[in-house]
């Protein structure tokens, strides 16, 4: 009944003592297409976040064999919330501190969420570089500039999806919102194979 069944199966298997290993090989990787519309993307992310919330509240992560596994699992299932509170903090805290009579050090401390977000954006840029290199995707340098431009709006969409998931969970709305795909990546891959 979990909306992120892959994460649920992994957690239950690990808690039962099975060793879980992830293999990443570019030669046999499958392509995942981003949903075709913003609405569909929000539905997909809301569904995933509800699934993470379900795993969090089920407590299965507390049954993992080691404290390290428990903390890593907790971090993974809380990651959407962590980033989204950082984004909210980045917007609200500096405004509050710059419009208040508080010490300089506290004002600088209020920008801490921004530092985490910038670090995350830099890691995404490195990840994009590695993805392009591993899968031999050619594109111009403009793609990196676009990633920087859309990073904060993208985080806002993710924050909205997380909030939407929390509301759905509180309302016990457990329906599966189907993600709309057009399979463009399969058509592109098929065209490359023919050529």
Image (cartoon, rainbow, N blue to C red):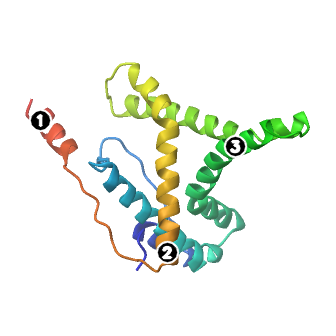
| Relative depth, front residue between 115 and 22 | 115
Q: Which residue is mark 2?
A: 169
Dot 2 lies on which element?
A: helix
Residue at the location (56% across, 35% down)?
A: 121
Q: Are marks 3 and 1 in contact (CB under 8 Å)?
A: no
Q: Position of residue 19 (x, y in %)?
A: 52, 67
- Look at the image and tell me in which quarter the N terminus lies: bottom left
Q: Earlier in the sequence, mark 3 or mark 2?
A: 3
| Relative depth, front residue between 85 and 3 | 85
Q: Earlier in the sequence, mark 3 or mark 1?
A: 3
Q: Are marks 1 and 2 in contact (CB under 8 Å)?
A: no
Q: Which residue is mark 1?
A: 191
| Relative depth, front residue between 13 and 172 | 172
> Considering only vertical position in the picture, is 41 above or below 186?
below
Q: Which mark is residue 146?
A: none
Residue at the location (46% across, 34% down)?
A: 150
> Mark 1 or mark 2: which is in front?
2
Residue at the location (53% across, 38% down)?
A: 152
Q: Position of residue 32 (x, y in %)?
A: 31, 49
Q: Which residue is mark 3?
A: 113
């Amino acid at each position: 009944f979990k909306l992120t069944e892959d994460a649920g199966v992994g957690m239950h298997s690990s808690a039962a003592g099975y060793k879980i290993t992830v293999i990443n090989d570019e030669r046999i990787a499958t392509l995942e297409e981003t949903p075709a519309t913003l609405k569909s993307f929000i539905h997909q992310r809301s569904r995933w976040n509800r699934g993470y919330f379900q795993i969090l509240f089920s407590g299965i992560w507390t049954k993992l064999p080691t404290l390290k596994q428990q903390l890593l699992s907790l971090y993974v299932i809380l990651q959407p919330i962590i980033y989204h509170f950082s984004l909210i903090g980045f917007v609200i805290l500096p405004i509050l501190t710059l419009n208040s009579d508080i010490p300089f050090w506290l004002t600088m401390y209020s920008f801490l969420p921004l530092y985490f977000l910038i670090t995350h954006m830099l890691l995404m840029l490195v990840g994009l570089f590695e993805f392009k290199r591993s899968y031999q995707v050619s594109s111009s340098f403009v793609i990196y500039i676009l990633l920087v431009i859309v990073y904060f709006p993208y985080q806002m969409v993710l924050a909205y999806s997380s909030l939407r998931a929390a509301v759905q969970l509180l309302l016990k709305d457990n329906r599966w919102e189907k993600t709309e795909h057009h399979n463009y990546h399969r058509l592109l891959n098929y065209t490359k194979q023919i050529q």
